[in-house]
């Protein structure tokens, strides 16, 4: 919101308040005012000395006791110009302190009336951080981080630091270019990796079983050949055991 728009809104707000005050005064003026004696008789406490003063807004009158006058003199205050009802109406129209939730720590803080006027005169929006978080932000500065992929330094701004802190993230390890390149690579889902690993393990197990079966068959064939050879050698009176059987010690 620009300063010109804010000034325009402020002017319209003042015009609205002035029109409401004029309408209220006209409404009060249209009614017949009570007699002065009756007004004093209603508002004046019994046996309480004082004076009757005219109200600035409603054109009526109110009782101002001597005890109230001494209190006003003690604190060096001017005498009231409005009756109690008109003072309450004026107080309700005055700016009130605002309670705002901090954008960083989520705690609530008070934005006083004086601070509101200062912000309005300066053209600032209402604060979104408490005093401590504003000080912490001013103390922070941009960081230089070395990208773990391309090994170049990149700036980690204060705004991004606050966003990362709010989300509970650690500082980035890659620059924006390397981060985009990594995100662009095809990602294999964990389920697909798990299924591929299972298939590979099943293939290896089947291969081992097949090799073990072939080795057993070869050992059986060699044993049969050795038996036949031993029988032939024994039939002609020659020594047997020439062929070494699988698994036999030499």
Image (spheres, rainbow, N blue to C red):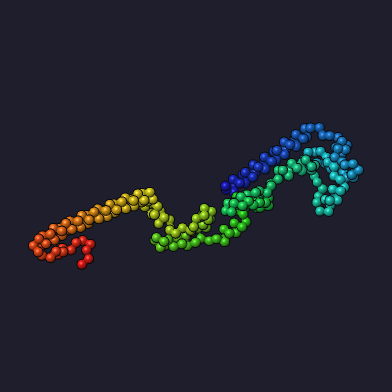
At x 29%, y 54%, the residue is: 204
Relative to 188, residue 135 above or below: below
The quarter of the rendered structure image containing the C terminus is bottom left
139 vs 148, left or right, is right
Camera-side residue of 65 and 19: 65
Q: Where is residue 101 in the image (x, y as percent from the top left)?
A: 61, 50
At x 61%, y 46%, the residue is: 6
Whether residue 121 appears in this view of the structure is no
Whether residue 93 appears in this view of the structure is yes
At x 31%, y 51%, the residue is: 202
61 vs 122, left or right, is right
Q: Position of residue 145 (x, y in %)?
A: 46, 62
Q: Position of residue 148 (x, y in %)?
A: 41, 61
Q: Quadrant of residue 132?
A: bottom right
Q: Which residue lies furthest to the bottom in this view?
A: 250
240 vs 59, left or right, is left
122 vs 193, left or right, is right
Camera-side residue of 48 and 78: 48
At x 83%, y 41%, the residue is: 62
Question: Looking at the image, how many numbered discs can be counted on the residues?
Answer: 0
Camera-side residue of 46 and 236: 236
Q: In which quarter of the image is residue 39?
A: top right
Camera-side residue of 137 and 246: 246
Q: Which residue lies furthest to the right in this view?
A: 47
Q: Where is residue 25 in the image (x, y as percent from the top left)?
A: 75, 37
């Amino acid at each position: 919101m620009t300063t010109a728009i804010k000034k325009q809104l402020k002017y319209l707000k003042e015009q609205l308040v002035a029109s409401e005050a004029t309408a209220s005064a006209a409404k009060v003026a249209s009614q017949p005012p009570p007699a002065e004696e009756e007004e004093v008789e209603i508002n004046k406490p019994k046996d309480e000395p004082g004076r009757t003063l005219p109200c600035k807004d409603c054109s009526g009158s109110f009782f101002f006791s001597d005890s109230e006058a001494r209190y006003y003199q003690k604190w060096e205050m001017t005498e009231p110009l409005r009756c109690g009802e008109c003072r309450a109406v004026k107080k309700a129209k005055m700016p009130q302190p605002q309670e705002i939730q901090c954008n960083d720590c989520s705690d609530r803080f008070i934005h006083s009336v004086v601070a509101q006027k200062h912000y309005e005169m300066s053209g600032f929006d209402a604060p979104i951080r408490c005093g401590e978080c504003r000080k912490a932000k001013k103390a922070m500065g941009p960081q230089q981080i070395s990208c773990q992929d391309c090994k170049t330094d990149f700036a980690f701004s204060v705004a991004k630091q606050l966003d990362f802190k709010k989300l509970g993230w650690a500082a980035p390890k890659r620059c924006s270019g390397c981060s985009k390149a990594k995100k662009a690579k095809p990602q294999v889902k964990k389920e697909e990796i798990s299924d591929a690993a299972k298939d590979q393990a099943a293939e290896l197990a089947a291969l081992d079983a097949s090799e073990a079966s072939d080795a057993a068959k070869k050992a059986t064939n060699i044993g049969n050949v050795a038996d036949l050879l031993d029988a032939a050698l024994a039939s002609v009176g020659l020594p047997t055991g020439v062929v070494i059987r699988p698994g036999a010690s030499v």
